[in-house]
Amino acid sequence: MSKGIKSILKVGGETAILPLFLFLVLAVCLPLLTVRRLWFRPRAKPRVIWGPTPIINISTNAAADRLYGYRSDTLVYRPYYITQDFTYNLERWWRYPWLALFIPWAVFLWAVMRYDIFQLYFDGGFLNRTLGRRLELPLLKLLGKKIVVSAYGADVRTERITRSLGPYNCCMDCPQRLTFCICDEERAERNQKHVSRYADVTLSMGDMVEYTPGSRNDMFYWAIDLKKWPFVGVSLSSCPIKVVHAPNHPQFKGTRFLQRAIAELQAEGYAVELVMVTGVSNDQARDLYVQADIVADQFIIGWYGNFAVEAMALGKPVIAYVRKPEQYLPRGVDCPIVNAAPDTLKAALTCLLTDAQLRFEIGVRGRRYVEEVHALERVGARMDSLYRNLWSGPNRETGHSCSGEMRVL
């Protein structure tokens, strides 16, 4: 069957599903949820659902929620790679076209009857890529749900703003516009207005704050389980010194600048080896991270990635380009990332290559930074405060509040 015919059948099928879906929401779900609110004592703690964007952070964030007693689950339609970390993975059901047509609608109905807080991203919720996409947020509000929308990067970055940030930016090496990020200014603005109208709160951090006016930028919501990432530090006698880089998308990581800097250092006689981590399992990747003397993260986006968080947790010195440290980084916390843009990268590497003690000390400080900012317990505490405010307002007795900048908890 041709793609064109399949597309017509899909649109026709969704057109038939939409009235039935709205009937079920308005005639069944809304009355049941209203009765539950009126006649039953509200849950002491709301139930939280994360998805469907299949980034691994939703799994660790749900784990952070559970530390504070929340029922917090994740649901994805198609993961980026095989993992057991998501609560519900519906990938196998997408093999059947007609069944796949019903899945988003069924998931939405199931979720609204089961969960109270919806943790979504700017690229859409469970009805994303259906005719009901624009209805999802208003329906969630109608049904009394709380909505938290966060940015992860590609879901908010637009070309005009990105290029205005300086010579080193996410667009400079992009091979195909509108493929990797939202890019289009008008489309992004419409999406921002729609999200802002219905979301109870929007969250952002790092360079993503440039694209999300009105967002809270103090939550630092990338959580990591430090029990799975124990401190190992660095050797004081490595030779050659291993610089580890994990470019899932080299065109957005500034990989070419790193390769050039390493090549020049090798030509000058430095005993340095560049280890590129690509196309390997998570366990193999972690083994390579453990062996690193220096971790090179990314150099054109202007913010550090999850790879940097994992590396700092291991006690590795990290080099990355943070465009506006005074605005992007958490206040009152020592962030030891060696800040280097492409034009200062070689000098930063040279400094670390020639001082083993400095590498070790930065690694120790990096572990401390992750413990204070990204550990499950820290992210969970900040989310707990947010949920308390959304669910029942500020708790005056315990002093929980969501206002103001992030404090070290």
Image: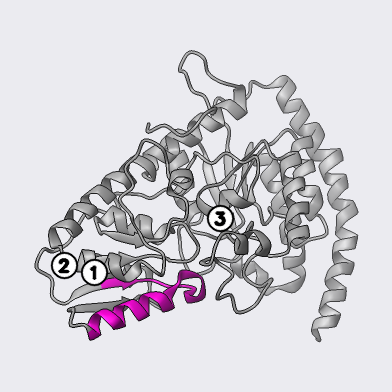
What residue does disc 1 label? 350
Taking the spot 37% from the left edge, 68% from the top edge, the residue there is 282
Residue type marked 1: Thr
Q: Are marks 2 and 1 in contact (CB under 8 Å)?
A: yes
Q: Position of 358 compared to 400: left or right? A: left
First reached walking from the N terminus: tag 1 or tag 3? 3
Query: Nearer the viewer's eye, disc 1 or disc 3?
Result: 1
Q: Position of 104 compared to 292: left or right? A: right
Residue type marked 3: Tyr
**In the figure, 408 relative to 5: above or below?**
above
* Residue 25 image-quadrant placement: top right
Taking the spot 38% from the left edge, 73% from the top edge, the residue there is 281
Tell me where residue 6 appears, x and y as whole percent: 82, 78
* Residue 3 image-quadrant placement: bottom right
Which numbered tag is attached to residue 142? none
Residue type marked 2: Thr
Find numbered disc 2 in the image and state the secondary structure of the residue it sits on: loop
Q: Magenta span: helix, strand or loop, mainly?
A: helix
What is the span of residues highlighted in magenta in the rendered image? 243-267
Q: CA distance from mark 1 to mark 3?
A: 32 Å
Q: Is residue 292 visible?
A: no
**In the figure, 228 relative to 200: above or below?**
below
Tell me where residue 240 appears, x and y as whole percent: 16, 77
Q: CA distance from mark 2 to mark 1?
A: 6 Å
What residue does disc 2 label? 354
Which numbered tag is attached to residue 152? 3
Quarter of the picture containing the N terminus is bottom right
Query: Nearer the viewer's eye, disc 3 or disc 2?
Result: 2
Tell me where residue 355 appears, x and y as whole percent: 15, 63
Which class describes the residues within 10 Å of circle 3: few (<14), some (14-19), or many (20+)? many
Taking the spot 60% from the left edge, 22% from the top edge, the residue there is 393
Q: Does the magenta portion include 263?
A: yes
